Amino acid sequence: LAALAPKVAAVAVVTGRPPGVAVRHGGFAGVPNLEHLVVLGHYGAERWDAVTGTVTAPAPHPGVAAARAELPGLLDRVGAWQGTWIEEKGRAVAVHTRRAADPQAAFEALREPLTDLATRHGLVVEPGRMVLELRPPGMDKGVALLEYAREIGAGSVLYAGDDLGDLAAFTAVDKLRASGTPGVLVCSGSEEVTELRERADLVVDGPSGVVRLLRTLAARLA
């Protein structure tokens, strides 16, 4: 990213997790040539700018705390508590089923009750790979990407993703392309999310493939 960033208008990390998590795991803070990196966390609800090192965010949605308080009891009533786990994401809360004895069965069993819970508290449910996330409406990677692309006046866009949550960003790139902004869709080679692979312009071999792609771009861009 540090090699690529000086050669393009902007580099943004779009994630459903808090921006601080991405900054910490990515080691982005204080890196030369990444001064203008932006992390759009919580699907754009929170933003970290490398140039200032600060996070800007609106007030949290009260429905998230209310839904979070009910989740343990709901998982117990549904009989899906064993092997599932709740991830606290600040402005959202997620239930993972990957560790269940039958992850897909647990996922399907929880979809309807979690949707009901989310609706009661003014939230929406976003499915991922063996995870159901409850979050405020109007928060997704597509909204975050469109708003940022328009903010910087992007002349072209490359977006890489590997999960169901990235489908919204793929749709956003399609909208940009329809309005005349060139775009490239990259699937980070996940066998679990065939929808991404089928819609992508380019499929690479997982995260290492994304790294090779960005290194190649950095080397070839004048």
Image (cartoon, helix red, strand yellow):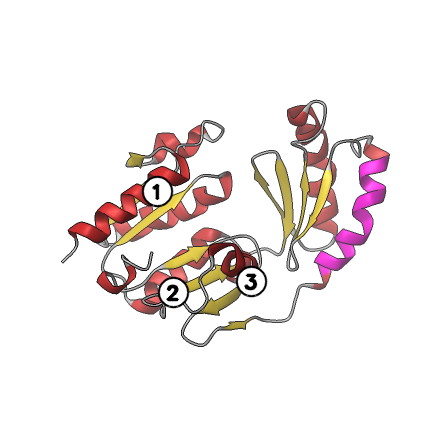
Residue drawn at (23%, 46%), measured in percent from left and top?
216
What residue is pinned by disc 2?
A: 37
Instruction: Check contact, mark 3 vs mark 1: CB within 8 A.
Output: no
Q: Is residue 171 magenta?
A: no
In this view, the residue farthest toward the bottom is 52
Q: Is residue 163 above or below residue 2?
A: above
Q: In this view of the protein, which residue sits in the foreground, 27 or 52?
A: 27
Mark 3 vs 2: CB contact within 8 A: no
Residue density around tag 1, few if under 14, some if 14–19, many if 20 or more, within 10 Å: some
x then y, percent, for residue 136: 62, 56
Task: Say left or right for 7 vs 195.
Answer: left
In this rendering, the answer to whether 188 lies above or below 62 is above
Looking at marks 2 and 1 on the same chain, the residue that comes earlier in the sequence is marked by: 2
**Residue 198's quadrant in the figure?**
top left
Which residue is nearer to you in this view: 17 or 147? 17
Q: What span is colored magenta in the figure? A: 63-76
Is residue 66 on the magenta stretch?
A: yes
Q: Secondary structure at mark 2?
A: loop
Per the model, the C-alpha gap separating discs 2 and 1 is: 17 Å
Q: Amino acid at mark 3?
A: Gly
Badge number at residue 20: 3
The amino acid on which the numbered mark 1 sits, given as a three-letter code, is Val
How far is disc 3 from disc 1 in space, using C-alphas?
22 Å
Amino acid beneath label 2: Leu
* Spot occupied by residue 84 in the image (x, y as percentages of width and height): 73, 35
Locate the C terminus by quadrant. Answer: bottom left
Of callouts 3 and 2, the N-terminal one: 3
Q: Is residue 89 visible?
A: yes
Determine the image quadrant of residue 210: top left
- Residue corresponding to mark 1: 210
Say above or below: 169 vs 8: above
Residue at the image position 39 percent from the left and 59 percent from the top: 12
